[in-house]
Image (cartoon, helix red, strand yellow):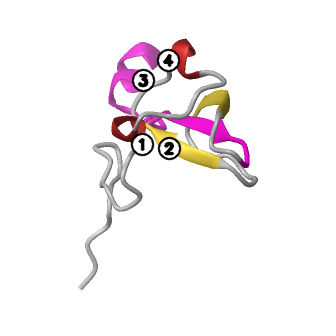
């Protein structure tokens, strides 16, 4: 029965983040439900190992105002 409930429960949506150093080079990746704390983390659409120690392509960054499919907003009256 727990399996059936797990199918309908909300799960946190994990997103990809890249850590950029002061010169804009990618130093690390993180896949988590909440944004990492600290300076230099930017949200990206995917993590590619070839980006390590390289500048991120402009197409890799996610717009800060983009809505994520997993986000749910409550309607209030």
13 magenta-colored: yes
Q: Position of residue 13 (x, y in %)?
A: 44, 36
Foreground mark, 1 or 2, reads 1
Q: CA distance from mark 1 to mark 2?
A: 6 Å
Q: Earlier in the sequence, mark 1 or mark 4?
A: 4
Look at mark 4 in the image and give the residue it sits on: 48
Q: CA distance from mark 3 to mark 2?
A: 28 Å
In the picture provided, is 45 more to the left or to the right than 53?
Answer: left
Q: Position of residue 21 (x, y in %)?
A: 72, 43
Quadrant in which residue 17 is drawn: top right
> Which secondary structure, mark 4?
loop
Q: Earlier in the sequence, mark 1 or mark 3?
A: 3
Q: Earlier in the sequence, mark 1 or mark 2?
A: 2
Magenta-colored span: 1-22
Callout 1 touching callout 2 (CB < 8 Å): yes
Give neighbour class at mark 3: few <14, some 14-19, many 20+ (Cα, 10 Å): few
Quadrant in which residue 55 is drawn: top right
Look at mark 3 in the image and give the residue it sits on: 6
Disc number placed over residue 61 in the picture, else none: 1
Quick one: 74 or 18, which is closer to the camera? Answer: 18
Look at mark 2 in the image and give the residue it sits on: 43
The residue at 56%/47% (across/down) is 42
Quick one: 74 or 35, which is closer to the camera? Answer: 35
Foreground mark, 3 or 4, reads 4
> Which secondary structure, mark 1?
loop
Q: Is residue 29 above or below residue 77?
A: above
Which residue is the extreme one toward the front? Answer: 23
């Amino acid at each position: 029965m727990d399996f059936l409930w797990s199918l309908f429960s909300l799960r946190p949506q994990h997103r990809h983040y890249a850590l950029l150093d002061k010169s804009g080079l990618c130093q690390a990746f993180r896949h988590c439900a909440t944004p990492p704390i600290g300076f230099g983390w930017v949200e990206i659409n995917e993590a590619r190992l070839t980006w390590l120690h390289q500048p991120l392509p402009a197409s890799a960054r996610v717009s800060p105002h983009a809505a994520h499919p997993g986000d749910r907003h409550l309607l209030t009256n």
